[in-house]
């Protein structure tokens, strides 16, 4: 039942020579590291809507909320061409069951935020969204999206990758069949992960699962998926992680000696003060989970939400 993680990606990030100047923007983290765990679905809006390589560069102009895509020198308006192609492309992409999309930043077609939009005096404001990126985000409102520039921030990178792996597990749960037992099982395993992102949604989702028997299945699964994606879109902070770590410590009240508890609390405090990375308290707790065979914590995705090779919890 294991599903592949499919990610949409701006084609130039894979090293393809599709940019206006005939070049590319190869990103080695995306191709060589994350690429081992995902399958990319490349999309270059400018080439796929029929423009050549090389081509005249373009930019956004006009109203930042509804800008036009204009060629920089000849001032041709490419907006309709791009929009018409993009509206068909998003329908095709539905079949791919994407778990996320990684956009090239600063692009008037592919950029997801803070794209320059020029006014009639030629002055830019960084408030636009690329024409294709806007159509993707509008069509798939719960899809995890990031741009490659933001993925250099370790916290944003961790958050994005946590979301795509969670969406993959959610799709696997759906593939098993929409029944209440599968939902309860998924929720039980993800409780601490959800708590580390959004304590309020943790409550809401717990309430939703508790009244699962009273709800129609379609409605139940739809509401749960929305809450899940909303919850994970909020970053897990040291404060929220400390709350989860202390919660897990509570499961070992009987087994740990006073000295072992003190050591674990000191490590959690070191993490809270951002002296040591999250992987350190997580590793020690995982050791106790194995040693004492703690059944509830054993199944918690929080302890192992993505491959350790990605080193997402190694930053402070
Ligand atoms: S930024 Fe987007 S439109 Fe530009 S080359 Fe890359 S994929 Fe193509």
Image (cartoon, grey):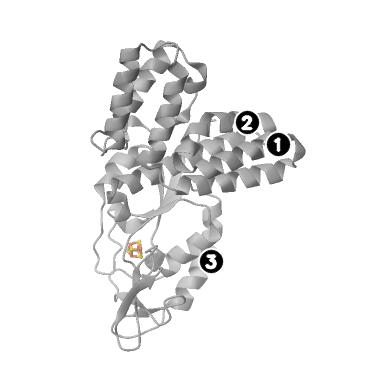
Task: List x then y, in percent, for residue 120.
Answer: 35, 88
**Do the CB atoms of the residues marked 1 and 2 lie less than 8 Å apart?**
yes
280 vs 214: above or below: above
User: Which residue is denoted by mark 2 in the rendering?
Assistant: 184
Mark 3 closeness class: few <14, some 14–19, many ≥20 residues within 10 Å: some
Mark 2 closeness class: few <14, some 14–19, many ≥20 residues within 10 Å: some
User: Which residue is denoted by mark 1 in the rendering?
Assistant: 212
Please tell me which of labels 2 and 3 falls first in the chain.
Answer: 3
**Do the CB atoms of the residues marked 2 and 3 lie less than 8 Å apart?**
no
Disc 1 and disc 3: Cα gap in Å?
Answer: 36 Å
Position of 227 compared to 57: left or right? right
Q: Is residue 51 visible?
A: no
| Callout 2 secondary element | helix
Question: Closest to the observer: 156 or 23?
Answer: 156
Position of 297 compared to 104: left or right? right
77 vs 241: above or below: below
Please tell me which of labels 1 and 2 falls first in the chain.
Answer: 2
- Indicate the quadrant where residue 155 lies: top left
Task: List x then y, in percent, for residue 143.
Answer: 50, 52
Q: Is residue 57 visible?
A: yes
Position of 164 compared to 264: left or right? right
Question: Closest to the observer: 181 or 266?
Answer: 266
* Residue at x-position 48% and y-position 77%: 80
Task: List x then y, in percent, for residue 99.
Answer: 48, 46
Of the two numbered discs 1 and 3 in the rendering, the one whose residue sits closer to the viewer: 1
* Residue at x-position 29% and y-position 85%: 122
Task: List x then y, in percent, for residue 180.
Answer: 68, 32
User: Which residue is denoted by mark 3 in the rendering?
Assistant: 87
């Amino acid at each position: 039942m294991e599903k592949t993680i499919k990610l949409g990606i701006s084609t130039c990030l894979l090293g393809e020579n599709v940019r206006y100047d005939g070049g590319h923007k190869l990103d080695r983290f995306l191709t060589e590291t994350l690429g081992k765990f995902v399958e990319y679905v490349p999309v270059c809006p400018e080439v796929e809507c029929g423009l050549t390589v090389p081509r005249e560069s373009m930019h956004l102009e006009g109203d930042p909320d509804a800008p036009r895509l204009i060629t920089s020198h000849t001032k041709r308006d490419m907006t309709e061409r791009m929009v018409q192609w993009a509206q068909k492309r998003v329908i095709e992409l539905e079949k791919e069951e994407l778990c996320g999309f990684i956009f090239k930043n600063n692009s008037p077609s592919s950029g997801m935020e803070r794209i320059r939009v020029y006014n009639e005096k030629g002055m830019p404001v960084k408030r636009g969204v690329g024409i294709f990126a806007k159509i993707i985000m509008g069509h798939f409102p719960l899809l995890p999206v990031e741009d490659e520039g933001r993925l250099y921030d370790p916290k944003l990178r961790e958050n994005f990758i946590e979301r795509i792996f969670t969406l993959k597990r959610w799709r696997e749960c759906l593939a098993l069949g929409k029944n209440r037992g599968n939902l309860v099982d998924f929720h039980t395993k993800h409780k601490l992960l959800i708590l580390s992102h959004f304590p309020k949604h943790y409550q809401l989702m717990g309430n939703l699962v508790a009244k699962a028997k009273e709800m129609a299945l379609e409605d139940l699964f739809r509401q749960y998926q929305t809450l899940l994606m909303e919850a994970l879109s909020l970053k897990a902070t040291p404060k929220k992680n400390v709350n989860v770590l202390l919660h897990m410590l509570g499961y070992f009240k009987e087994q740990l000696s006073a000295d072992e508890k003190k050591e674990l609390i000191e490590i959690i405090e070191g993490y809270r003060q951002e002296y040591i990375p999250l992987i350190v308290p997580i590793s020690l707790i995982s050791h106790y989970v194995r040693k004492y065979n703690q059944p509830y914590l054993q199944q918690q995705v929080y302890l192992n939400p993505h491959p350790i090779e990605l080193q997402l919890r190694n930053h402070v």
